[in-house]
């Protein structure tokens, strides 16, 4: 007496990164009495996909769906392939359940689970289409490939010049575009993997964004400056170059070869004149960026699980995420110019007008009474640099009902226990 | 019934004004004024709307008080702003009296002594942004200095080209050309003094690329007559327009511009080889380039001496010829943009056919020969679709 067995499961049990149109297959056999094909009932994701002996229910009746007789280790059995014409939802756990009996009415009810892979959820151009924020449905693992522009391949001539990791789900691509195609697709390299170690499966890759809302052609010059290729006016003074075009005016610092500013309002520049009389400003300010909205504040005592929050701004210019580095207790937490988050830190860097809002969460909470020193290094657009630090101390955190609490100097405060 | 504007402080045309200045003036009338009709604009922004001061012009010093000057009742306004600093400040005021008599005034002054401003037109008037204020993707520091609805007003909000100079009277003159390519024909060139007071030239014609020399001579392309017009004494005669051009260069003048449609003009002050301190003109045409070494001698009062015909013209085209003809690169003769570096011994031209084909020619003035011709095919340029060129020496 033997029970039916299920073997050669594909995808295998607990598979991750499964493609949205993956074929599900397995072999069923019985070393005692033969499998009774009339008894088959196969469910995928709780939906009946197949009823023996030969009925594949839509949408599991794709061209590859089939049941065939096979011999496995000298025993007759069946090989079943299920193809869904509707595909599977990304980042979803699917249960594949097989119910079958042999002719002796000995049965098996076997279930295994597979998880479909990650995908690009959205691509959002910035207001002036210089950068694209690519958001994945699920977090990706931070590897060198994630911050590598070559990992992101576009159609129709667009290419990524720089990649910044903004959050665990979002990467910002500085793109260049040399043609006026209005539809593009993005294919992410298999080297960019999710937390399960899987690249984006084929069917979830090739995100199409169309129509691209911009009429801007972006051009690249030595990798450090950017402008619109359709600029039709050029002017220069001793320090700067000004380009006027259909998107406004770009200004470049000649000496540093660095993009300085972009202005845009009505998306057309008919005429342009730069008046320099009596002296030339080279973005006259020398003020360095400054911190504000700091929490926990310098010298304070904070819960062990406090999120490190601050904003870094500049009175006259802007700060790009690429010009921000943050260290926590001398460990690099964020480097906007290389890979974004490091050493298990996570959080967000939100670009605001003239400032960045930053939230940092360490990989593990700090110990009670530990000092936490946050060092912030930030440059504004013309290179004025802030390099400052502040320190707070983690309090002890006795567990109490309804959350974590802590007490110091006779006072008692209660946190919610959430981050 | 008369409305008076008095005691403007800082005064019109005043320079060296401190950044923390407060702006004040009086407005009075022989009949009562309508306070609600009193509007004050500073750099195109509403500063007082008839009842309150609008941020950022509502600093602690801003106030409206009643006055009586010479027996006439009115208001004394003080405007204290949080954000006035180096560059021109344009003030315009309008008010009605209770009998609906309307009056307006405007003036401008310069905080500090230097001008570092980008002027541009985006189809919605003449605008400016102080260079120090350039901020990524920001628009809040842009000011509209002139538009069809400003006081004073310009005839059309799309300006084809702009060029300015600060002349010996220490005022800044901004020439705004109206080209029929972008605007309805017939607006000529408007010149704003210190961003406000307007004078017009070649009214009724389509004009392009008006430029003002350091000596206050204005050159412009009159596209309708296919000529270069010259106006002397721009500031001495400011406000005296309309007046005819003092001299005209065309294909039959002496010196003559090569035949064909005039496409562009580049003016360099003080480098003429024919007259010390004279002007050099680069005139791009559909057939090539004419360089004119001007004899633009002036009388002590700045008026024309009458010797422009002593200038000399040199022509450059794609055909290598004899005499004064020099070679420019490529196969397209149209010169759509010209520039030169500050040493004035090299100039560059852009040839364009209007379909994205062209290249950049660099020519030595010393030898009269082409130094280099740059194209995408030569590897020097990312594209042959070149729209404009600007040369400046050093750095």
Image: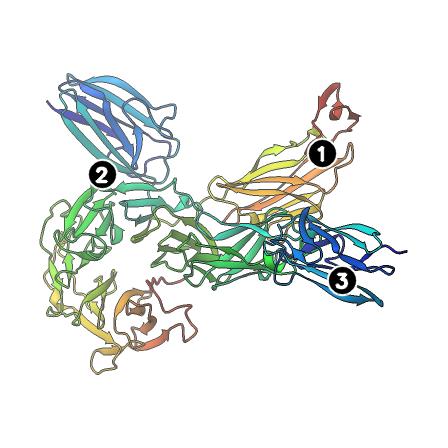
Residue at which label 2 appears: B149
Residue at 49% across, 61% down: A158
Element under label 1?
Answer: loop
Q: Is residue B4 above or below residue B304?
A: above
Q: Residue at point 71% right, 55% down? A: A52
Given this view, does label 2 or label 3 mark the residue nearer the observer? 3
Identify the residue position indicated by label 3 in the image.
A78
- Distance, label 2 to label 3, CA atoms, is 83 Å
User: Considering the numbered disc 3 on the image, is that residue within a helix, a strand or a loop?
Assistant: strand
Marks 1,2: beta carbons within 8 A: no
Looking at the rendered structure, whether the residues under marks 2 and 3 are on a common chain is answered as no
Q: Which mark is residue B158?
A: none
Using the image, name the chain to which the residue with label 2 belongs.
Answer: B
- State which tag comes first along the sequence, 1 or 3: 3
Instruction: Judge from the rendering whether residue B52 lies leftward or rightward of residue B193; answer left or right.
Output: right
Q: Quadrant of the N terminus of chain B?
A: top left
Q: Is residue A407 left or right of residue A237?
A: right
Tell me if residue B52 comes above or below residue B356 in the rendering: above
Q: Residue A178, position in %: x, y?
A: 44, 63
Residue closest to the eye, A163 or A258 = A163
Tags 1 and 3 both on a single chain: yes
Q: Which residue is mark 1?
A: A305
Q: CA distance from mark 1 to mark 3?
A: 55 Å
| Separation of marks 1 and 2 at Cα, in angstroms | 58 Å
């Amino acid at each position: 007496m033997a029970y039916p067995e299920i073997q050669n499961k594909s995808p295998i049990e607990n598979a991750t990164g499964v493609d949205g149109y993956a074929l599900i297959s397995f072999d069923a056999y019985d070393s005692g009495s033969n499998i009774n094909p009339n008894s088959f009932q196969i469910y995928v994701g709780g939906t009946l996909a197949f009823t023996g002996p030969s009925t594949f229910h839509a949408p599991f009746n794709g061209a590859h769906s089939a049941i065939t007789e096979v011999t496995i280790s000298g025993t007759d059995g069946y090989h079943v392939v299920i193809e869904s014409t509707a595909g599977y939802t990304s980042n979803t756990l699917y249960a594949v359940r097989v119910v079958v009996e042999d002719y002796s009415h000995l049965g098996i009810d076997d279930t295994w689970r597979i998880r479909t892979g990650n995908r690009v959820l959205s691509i959002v151009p910035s207001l002036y289409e210089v950068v694209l924020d690519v958001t994945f449905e699920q977090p990706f693992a931070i590897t060198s490939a994630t911050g590598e522009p070559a990992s992101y391949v576009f159609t129709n001539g667009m290419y990524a010049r720089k990649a910044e990791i903004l959050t665990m789900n979002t990467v910002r691509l500085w793109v260049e575009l040399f043609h006026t195609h209005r539809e593009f697709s993005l294919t992410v390299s298999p080297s960019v993997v999710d937390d399960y170690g899987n690249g984006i499966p084929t069917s979830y890759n090739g995100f199409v964004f169309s129509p691209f809302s911009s009429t801007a052609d972006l051009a690249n010059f030595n990798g450090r400056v950017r402008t619109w290729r359709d600029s039709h006016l050029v002017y220069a003074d001793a320090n700067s170059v000004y380009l006027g075009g259909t998107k406004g005016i770009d200004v470049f610092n000649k000496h540093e070869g660095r993009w300085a500013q972009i202005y845009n309002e009505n998306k057309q520049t008919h005429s342009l004149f730069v008046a320099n009389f009596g002296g030339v400003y080279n973005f006259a300010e020398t003020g360095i960026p400054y911190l504000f909205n700091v929490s926990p504040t310098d010298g304070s005592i904070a819960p062990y699980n406090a999120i490190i929050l601050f904003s870094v701004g500049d009175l006259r210019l802007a700060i790009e995420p690429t010009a921000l580095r943050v260290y926590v207790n001398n460990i690099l937490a964020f480097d906007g110019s290389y890979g974004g988050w490091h050493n298990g830190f996570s959080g967000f860097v939100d670009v605001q007008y003239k400032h960045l809002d930053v939230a940092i969460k360490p990989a593990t909470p700090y110990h009670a009474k530990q000092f936490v020193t946050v060092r912030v290094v930030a440059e504004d657009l013309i290179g004025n640099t802030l390099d400052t630090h502040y320190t707070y101390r983690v309090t002890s955190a006795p567990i109490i009902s309804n959350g974590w609490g802590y007490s110091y100097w006779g006072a008692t405060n209660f946190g919610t226990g959430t981050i | 019934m008369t409305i008076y504007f008095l005691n403007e402080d800082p005064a019109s045309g005043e320079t060296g004004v401190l950044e923390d200045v407060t702006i004040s003036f009086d407005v009075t009338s022989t009949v009562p004024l309508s306070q609600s009709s009193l509007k004050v604009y500073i750099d195109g922004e509403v500063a007082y709307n008839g009842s309150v001061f609008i941020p950022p012009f509502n600093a602690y010093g801003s106030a409206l008080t009643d006055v009586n000057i010479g027996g006439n009742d009115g208001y004394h306004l003080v405007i204290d702003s949080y954000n006035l600093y180096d560059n021109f400040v344009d003030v315009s005021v309008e008010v009605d009296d209770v009998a609906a008599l309307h009056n307006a005034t405007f003036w401008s002054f310069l905080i500090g002594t230097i001008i570092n401003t980008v002027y541009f037109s985006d189809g919605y008037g003449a605008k400016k942004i102080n260079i120090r204020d350039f901020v990524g993707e920001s628009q809040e520091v842009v000011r509209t200095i002139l538009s069809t609805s400003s006081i004073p007003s310009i005839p059309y909000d799309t300006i084809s080209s702009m060029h300015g100079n600060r002349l010996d009277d220490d005022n800044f003159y901004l020439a705004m050309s109206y080209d029929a390519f972008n605007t309805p024909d017939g607006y000529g060139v408007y010149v704003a003094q210190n961003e406000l007071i307007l004078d017009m030239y070649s009214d009724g014609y389509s004009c392009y690329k008006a430029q003002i020399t350091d000596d206050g001579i204005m050159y412009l392309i009159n596209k309708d007559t296919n000529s270069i017009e010259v106006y002397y004494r721009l500031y001495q005669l400011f406000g005296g327009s309309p007046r005819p051009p003092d001299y005209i260069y065309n294909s039959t003048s002496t010196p003559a511009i090569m035949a064909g449609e005039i496409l562009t003009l580049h003016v360099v002050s003080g480098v003429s080889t024919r007259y010390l301190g004279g002007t050099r003109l680069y005139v791009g045409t559909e057939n090539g380039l004419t360089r004119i070494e001007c004899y633009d001698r002036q009388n002590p009062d700045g008026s024309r001496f009458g010797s422009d015909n002593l200038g000399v013209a040199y022509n450059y085209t794609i055909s290598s010829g004899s005499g004064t003809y020099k070679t420019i690169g490529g196969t397209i003769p149209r010169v759509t943009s010209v520039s030169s570096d500050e040493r004035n011994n090299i100039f560059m031209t852009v040839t364009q056919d209007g379909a994205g084909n062209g290249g950049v020619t660099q020519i030595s003035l010393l030898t009269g020969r082409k130094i280099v011709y740059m194209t995408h095919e030569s590897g020097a340029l990312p594209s042959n679709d070149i729209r404009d060129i600007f040369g400046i020496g050093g750095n």
